[in-house]
């Protein structure tokens, strides 16, 4: 038995360690897999902290082990040794003073490194001509508005999906409609809170194309965990093509089924909350659906955008995200199919 | 003595459970049948012998979550656009004792569903029926007609009047639009 136990324990430690390291690997939602200048600073800071604190941990554990194994053990009967030993007291006192001084120095090093990182990030936003995006947090989704200060008719309203061109700074104004949320795309920057009636701003820049996941990072109610969003960093040309498409209103239905679906949409509860530009539907309580079919995910990144998920979502959203604003809807199978046809045509 | 203490503790604990249903949150509610509204009668005058008006109980009036949902819908569906936060403006006030089309839950339900002359739009088909019931419950809380234990206690934004749960019940009386002005 004794021969097996250490081996077994070692395996468990190895398994736990591999889980730990897998979680901080090359994910597209990882603070140490930086894709922009801000997050690069932050991940550098993270590695410095990890190195120093790991070193401190190793030293402390080593000293603790030495103290434990080298202690002079007295027998239970012997008189306790309480005679003062001035030479030893002095030696121990000096070691302690040295350790305190070293700790203070390490703390100052960490503080200065953190301060320099914060200052470096704060100095970056000054770049000219940033993409201007307004993000409004709501329970439990993100409203994304592209603001064109020179030409307001170019503004685009979308939800849960941010497209940005690489190599160009992005300014995101953050607001909340209800409670405090927090905007966090780990690959691009740290967190910034969205506070009701208190606008905040965050600047970042992506240098590598890719899809990066964002997440609400401040507990905001039932579906906090399913309040995700996607940042797609792409080349300037791809971004411009997407932006031009996003400005277009929805097209007219291509066939009878889509026309029927549009009619159902416009004459039922959908229009009270959702906007589809190019139609009379102009509700502003829920996400804008003008180009919903072009998105890879629905329900704030919690469902892949396919037909099955879409119909389940329309008929019983409360089973998927209990507590959200969208009510259950009872449609006949035929109507539901037509509605899905129409929504899937909103490219 | 100890037995009395134990009894007191048990009774106190029981009191704590009394309020459980007040907070109950029904997310997957079955839409109540609109036919439950069996009275759309707007006047107390009846032909021939008077028969009692059937009363419809709106379960949502005892439920804090449903009332707060009604309150949220009240601003999200832009009721505030005409009725303000109960004080009225373009539309009649809802926090007073005057009712043109009736103060009963099913009458308010009908008012929202059917719309009324002179500006009240019909929400038929535009809101799920259960949400109209939530709205109807909230509308009654504005003049203190729902239990104070369940009525909302504050606004999400700046408080513009007494909270619903501090509103004294106002005895409803029927008015015509002309006398109301």
Image (cartoon, coloured by chain):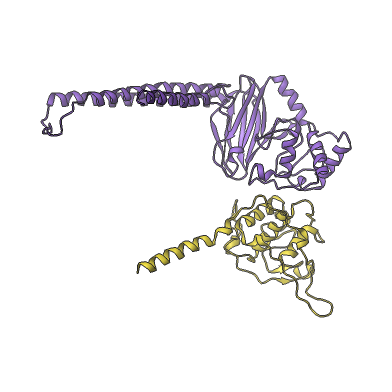
Chain colours: A purple, B yellow
Tell me what residue is drawn at x 52 percent, y 60 percent.
B17
Tell me what residue is drawn at x 60 percent, y 51 percent.
B156
- Would residue A248 appear left or right of A31 to someone viewing this image? right
Question: Would residue B60 be visible to someone looking at this image?
Answer: yes
Question: Horizontal and vertical percent for residue B23?
Answer: 58, 56
- How many marks can you see? 0
Residue B103 versus residue A194 in the image, above or below: below
**Residue pushed farthest front?**
A1
Question: Horizontal and vertical percent for residue A330?
Answer: 76, 48
Tell me what residue is drawn at x 67 percent, y 66 percent.
B96
When asked about the image quadrant of residue A193, the answer is top right
- Would residue A256 appear left or right of A46 to someone viewing this image? right
Question: Horizontal and vertical percent for residue B114?
Answer: 80, 59
Question: Horizontal and vertical percent for residue B37?
Answer: 76, 63
Quadrant in which the N terminus of chain A appears: top left
| Residue nearest the observer in this picture, B110 or B166 | B110
Residue A80 versus residue B167 in the image, above or below: above
Question: Would residue B181 be visible to someone looking at this image?
Answer: no
- Would residue B69 appear left or right of A240 to someone viewing this image? left
**Residue pushed farthest right?**
A256
When asked about the image quadrant of residue A70, the answer is top left
| Residue nearest the observer in this picture, A52 or B80 | A52
**Residue pushed farthest bottom?**
B49
Quadrant in which the C terminus of chain A appears: top right
When asked about the image quadrant of residue B1, the answer is bottom left
């Amino acid at each position: 038995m004794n021969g097996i136990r250490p081996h077994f324990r070692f395996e468990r430690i190895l398994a736990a360690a591999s889980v730990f390291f897998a979680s901080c690997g090359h994910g597209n939602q990882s603070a140490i897999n930086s894709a922009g200048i801000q997050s690069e600073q932050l991940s550098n800071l993270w590695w410095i902290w990890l190195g120093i604190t790991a070193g401190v941990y190793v030293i402390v554990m080593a000293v603790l082990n030495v103290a434990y194994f080298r202690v002079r053990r007295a027998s239970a009967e012997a008189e306790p040794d309480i005679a003062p030993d001035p030479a030893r007291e002095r030696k121990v006192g000096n070691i302690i003073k040295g350790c305190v001084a070293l700790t203070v120095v390490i703390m100052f090093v960490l503080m200065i490194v953190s301060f320099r990182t914060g200052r470096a990030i704060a100095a970056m936003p000054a770049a000219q001509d940033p993409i201007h995006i307004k993000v409004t947090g709501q329970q439990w989704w993100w409203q994304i508005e592209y603001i064109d200060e020179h030409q307001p008719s170019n503004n685009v309203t979308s939800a849960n999906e941010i497209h940005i061109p690489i190599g160009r700074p992005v300014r995101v104004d953050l607001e909340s409609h209800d409670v405090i949320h927090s905007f966090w795309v780990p690959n691009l920057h740290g967190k910034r809170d969205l506070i009701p009636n208190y606008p905040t701003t965050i600047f970042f820049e992506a240098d590598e194309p890719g899809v990066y996941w964002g997440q609400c990072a401040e507990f905001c109610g039932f579906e906090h965990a399913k309040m995700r969003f996607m940042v797609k960093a792409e080349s300037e040309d791809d971004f411009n093509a997407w932006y031009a498409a996003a400005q277009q209103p929805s097209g007219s239905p291509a066939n009878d089924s889509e026309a029927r679906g549009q009619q159902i949409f416009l004459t039922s509860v959908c229009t009270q909350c959702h906007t589809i530009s190019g139609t009379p539907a102009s509700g502003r309580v829920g996400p804008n659906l003008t180009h919903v079919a072009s998105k890879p995910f629905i329900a704030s990144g919690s469902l892949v955008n396919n037909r099955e998920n879409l119909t389940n979502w329309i008929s019983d959203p409360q089973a998927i995200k209990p507590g959200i604003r969208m009510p259950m809807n009872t449609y006949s199978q035929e109507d539901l199919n037509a509605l899905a046809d129409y929504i899937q045509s909103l490219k | 003595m100890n037995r009395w203490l134990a009894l007191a503790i048990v009774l106190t604990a029981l009191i704590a459970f009394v309020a459980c249903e007040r907070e109950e949150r029904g997310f997957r509610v079955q839409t109540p049948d609109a036919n439950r509204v069996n009275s759309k009668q707007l006047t107390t005058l009846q032909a021939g012998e008077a028969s009692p008006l059937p009363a419809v109980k709106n379960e949502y009036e005892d439920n804090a979550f449903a009332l707060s949902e009604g309150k949220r819908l009240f601003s999200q569906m832009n009721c505030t656009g005409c009725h303000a936060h109960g004080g009225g403006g373009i539309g009649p006030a809802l926090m007073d004792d005057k009712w043109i089309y009736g103060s009963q839950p099913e009458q308010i339900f009908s008012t929202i569903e059917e719309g009324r002359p002179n500006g009240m739009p019909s929400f038929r088909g535009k809101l799920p029926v259960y949400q109209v019931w939530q709205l109807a419950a909230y509308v009654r809380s504005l003049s203190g007609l729902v239990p104070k234990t369940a009525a909302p206690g504050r606004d999400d934004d700046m408080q513009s009047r007494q909270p619903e749960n501090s509103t004294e019940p106002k005895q409803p009386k029927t008015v015509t639009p002309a006398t109301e002005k």
